[in-house]
Image: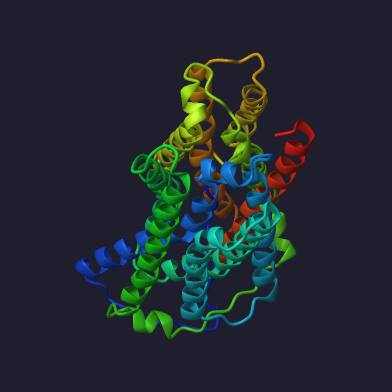
Amino acid sequence: MEPYASVSTPSDNVECSPVVWSVAETRRANQLFLLLGLCYYTPFCMLVQPVDYWRLLFPSFNINFRISFAYYIANVVVIFGLLAIGARQSFRWRIMGGFCSQLVVLLLLPASYYVLTSEIQHEIMVLLCSVVVAIGAAVAGSSLFGLAAMYPSGSIEHVQLGIGLSIFLTTAYRCMSKGAFPSDATVPASMAYFYTGAATMAIGVASYILLLRLPGSASVHATPQTHKVLQPTLLRKIRFNGLLVVLLNFSTMLVWPGLLTDIASFNVPSLNASGWFPLLLMGWDALFDALGRYCARYQLCFTRQNVWSLVLGRCLCIPVFVCLARNAVFTHDAITYFVVAVFSWTHGYGGALTVVFVNDCVDDAERSGAGMFASFFVNFGLVAGASLSFAFAKALGL
């Protein structure tokens, strides 16, 4: 379950020369933005997916709670700093710098297994990598959506589609790497997994370089980028729907990924011993999250005035997740799969709608600022949920 990237905007004092894009160039730009969106969130997904590898390194606790906590704390602090400063930025340096730093992490983290010797050393390394990945995502994401907004229609949608596919792709990476090695070869399988993720990030860097070479990109990147969106009047307009964005992402992080990966199979115990069941749940979650995002084009009966019912309704799943993780009351795999499907679909669907509805609260001239605030609301909800999830894990002994 993934966040939406930050939005940066062109300066109001700069007029952009219109650029005519051919159909072929537009299609090419959309394809490249799809890859950029996919790579934006892939590094964090790579960190939370190898549950069996983390259990090998940290047998006494679930490191996923700490990874999420460290990642979102660092991410929201950097995003708020970028939002508050509002200074001139460079698309090229932010996107390239953010992606390259994440690429380096995915190369160094698996190599550290052969160098570090104690559990505390491994924990420090993993959490440090989580922070670096978070900073890279915040820096790159603060420009990625703003850049897509300056390209032909459809670019932003392809970035979002790429973000939605990132969890599904990394789940597939983990399942394939685990299946390609013997059951007791967790370390070699994990090395292959992490280096596949590094190769994916390299594709993201290459995609941005190719994007720069498109004929219309020169005028886009020649436009100075500034923004100042911390305006109380704007915040008053969007505060209700902004709080719904916070609540939706807060409730998601109470469950994902830590509590979700603590649920054991009740009907097929062999999946627990082999480490496959958490991977299956992560894949199931990713599938329905992506389906929810796809369905968000249909608003059904929801408006910005009543979408609160969807946001609050999905919170009823949280006590069920706690019971499943504690082996209490609900003890059947069918219930697990059903609740995960409902919770994940409503995150993908509701997450997309609530962000759109924030923009619907303001005038056209204020949409760029509302987008930046929406991104902050998303990440604030994620970090608050990750923090409380970490505290619950301590209290429940998970």
Name which residue lies at 35% across and 66% down. Answer: 203
Using the rendered image of the protein, determine whether residue 275 is visible from the camera's viewpoint: yes
**Is the residue 134 above or below the residue 163 in the image?**
below
Q: Nearer the viewer, residue 325 or 124?
A: 124
Image quadrant of residue 212?
bottom left
Using the rendered image of the protein, determine whether residue 363 is visible from the camera's viewpoint: no
In percent of width and height, residue 234 lies at 68, 61
Q: Nearer the viewer, residue 264 or 230?
A: 264
Name which residue lies at 64% across and 65% down. Answer: 79
Image quadrant of residue 293?
top left
In percent of width and height, residue 188 lies at 43, 51
Name which residue lies at 62% across and 57% down. Answer: 126
Could you tell whether 287 is left or right of 359 in the image?
left
Image quadrant of residue 213?
bottom left
Q: Nearer the viewer, residue 340 or 153?
A: 340
In percent of width and height, residue 54 lies at 57, 46
The number of discs equals: 0
Which quadrant is home to the C terminus?
top right
| Chosen colour scheme | rainbow
In percent of width and height, residue 2 lies at 52, 48
Q: Nearer the viewer, residue 104 or 213?
A: 104
Could you tell whether 185 is left or right of 351 in the image?
left
**Is the residue 276 above or below the residue 209 in the image?**
above
Could you tell whether 309 is left or right of 186 in the image?
right
The extreme right residue here reads 395
